[in-house]
Image (cartoon, coloured by chain):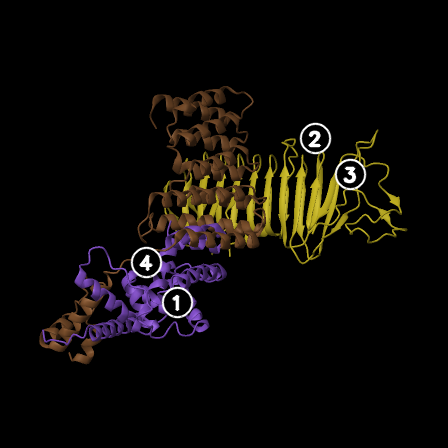
Amino acid sequence: MTDETLMLAVKAGNLDQLSGLFERYHRPLFGFFYRLLRDRAAAEDLVQDVFVRVLKYRHTFQERTSFKAWVFHIARNSRLDFARKHPGTDGIPDDEAMPAVEPGPDIGFGNRQEVALLHQALQRLPADKRELIILARYRDMNYQQLAAVMEIDEGAIRVRLHRAIRQLADIFHELRGTTRHAL
Amino acid sequence: MTRLVLVFVVLVGIGSRAAAQGADPISIALADPSRPATVNIALWAGVVSIVAVDNGAVVIDATTAQRSSPGQRRAGGRSATGGGVGRGADASGLTRLQPPAGVEISEANNVVTIRGPLGERVDLDIRVPVRTNLKLTKSAQGPTNSPGVVTVRGLDGDIEIRTNAGTITLEDVSGSVVAHSSNGSIIATVRRVTPDRPMAFTSYNGSVDVTLPRSVKANFFLQSSRGDVFTDFDVQKQRGGSGGTGEGATRRSDDRAIRATVNGGGPDIELRTYAANVYLRRGN
Amino acid sequence: MRCEDATDRLFDLASDDFLSKDPQVLAHLEACSECRRTVAHATRAWSLLGAAQEPVADSTAMRERFDALLENQVRKSLAPWNGRRALAAAAALIVTLAAGVLIGRQFPAVGKQDASYMTAMRQGMSEMRELLTQALIQQDVASERIKGVSAAGRIDDPRAELLTAVLDTLMHDADVNVRLASLRALERFRERPAVRQGIVRALGREESPLVTIALIDFVVDAKDDLAIETLRQLAGDTARDAAVRETAAAAAAQLLQGGV
């Protein structure tokens, strides 16, 4: 049963089917919010808020829409409203206060530091660029889905994403203090 | 919200003469004339005619062979039309109307129910508002010389008819139709079809002759076990039969159902008989 | 191609090495060390991003909150099942379900699924199907009951409960046309033992000659030998219409021969 079919069921009035979608999406949504905000409690609140909105706006879900794109679009709006209510969460975070990123088990020691630095760099990006990278890298969205989530066309999203990646790389390398060498 | 149901139940008179006895027409006002009416009829046998007119009431003319009870025409008393409780308390000078013996008529929440007595023939002549849903069941095999035909004209709604005897004629109806006569033909012209509603026109030994709008979208199931299937729709045939497609009547002969989609397909519409022919005609 | 044109097109998410496959871009890269550096740094950053583990969610806590939300919503907005509106929605739903199962993938592509999740999911689905079918079949309007059984017949691999509901309709619905539609819905599943047995039971008790003949055709097409005895009884039942008796007799003979 596809996500879309479940959501159409919810739209038609069978709210119980939202349970199945919660099962599939609460972790990806949590991951998205946590990577963005680095605040566990806030991330949990926002996941709940997403499902509140999914229920509230279920009648707007269109038959040919990708549910994944739709739910993350809602997630972005949730995050934007949250940022409005909690000013400062969007800005450049205090690196010391940030919880450390957990690197994967296979990362060597040297790389651990790099991974930490990279995520600091990520946090220094403006929130909307961070979102884009998180969706592309961690939620496996392709250009088409990203375009649907951000509600701009595919050509524009390519440019935006690529610029965000380059900006991330620049900040990262700044943090590393590495000078660029010719290749 | 249901109003109090007014039920007219009249006992069969003792020593009644076997003369046809009709009562005066009974007018049932609807609880909410702005909503469609529903008329449910359960009869043993009889001729039934239901015609749509532009009014807000259901007017029933019922005739049975039994003489109605002595109390049929009585002056004064409570208002006998479908008024609500508390209305029309003073009925002096009015005639109390009763349906003929054994016929029960009641109304609740826009649903008018007519029940005929078991084993008795009741002929009904009913005028209804255009937007009316109909459910009619006639259970008996009537005498072969008078099986009791059913005629419905002009209704727009969900029309459901099952009878064990008598031809069913549906003229200029709209909405959805699920009709069966086990011993009689079905002749129907449907002016407008409710989208996404399955329909069925079936008979055992009678022919099935249905005219539908040419724009109808449907998956047709056409079958006559011993007869032929004719249509002038341009069908994308999926199984069975022989012969060409296109303009003009097309003969098909097949034991099992011929499946055909029209205008890209849509809900299931079944035309079926065992012994006679099926005609699926393209209307306007 | 100049740097400013190339610089926004260096990458491609769809490409397995993250690098664009555009020949113009590749040609530029061969000639431009600045852009090569950009690609190298960005690729490194991108791959390091992947090194971070997925944050662990406290699923239990989140589940509890969600369940409370859903229960509240369901209580607030659930229309009675015998309301016409809910039924129209149910009908639309069954049709959508059928379409979704036919068109969509059988299994979700998102994330890893563990066995317990799939079990829970399947239970939810079949429960919903049953509820919907029951509701549609109980509808007052024959056209809606036909819609319900027809849609049930289009669902791939339905559970036994759903087929039982359709079989019940075949055996008990007051409307001939609804019974005919139920029979048609069961054609796809005529290899299932429960369906074959149910059809034979229906054959033994059906009163309408039209439906009886349809049932006889069904068992012949399904080559259901179980029906032979019932067919013989029908053929010998003098209360039955002559055509029904002949058809039953011919069907019994055909099944006995084992041919079509």
Q: Do dots 2 and 4 share one subunit?
A: no
Q: Which residue is mark 4?
A: C55
In the image, the chain rendered in brown is C
In this rendering, the answer to whether A98 lies above or below C206 is: below
In this rendering, the answer to whether A120 lies above or below B17 is: below
Q: Label 4, secondary structure: give it.
A: loop
In the image, the chain rendered in yellow is B
- How far apart are the alpha carbons under marks 1 and 2? 71 Å
10 Å neighbourhood of mark 1: few (<14), some, or many (≥20)? many
Whether pointer 2 and pointer 4 mark residues with C-beta atoms closer than 8 Å, the reply is no
Residue C12 seen anywhere in this rendered image of the structure? no
Q: Which residue is mark 3?
A: B9
In this rendering, the answer to whether A66 lies above or below C107 is: below
Residue at the location (39% across, 38% down)? C188
Left or right placement of residue B90 versus residue B47 in this view: right
Q: Which residue is mark 2?
A: B119
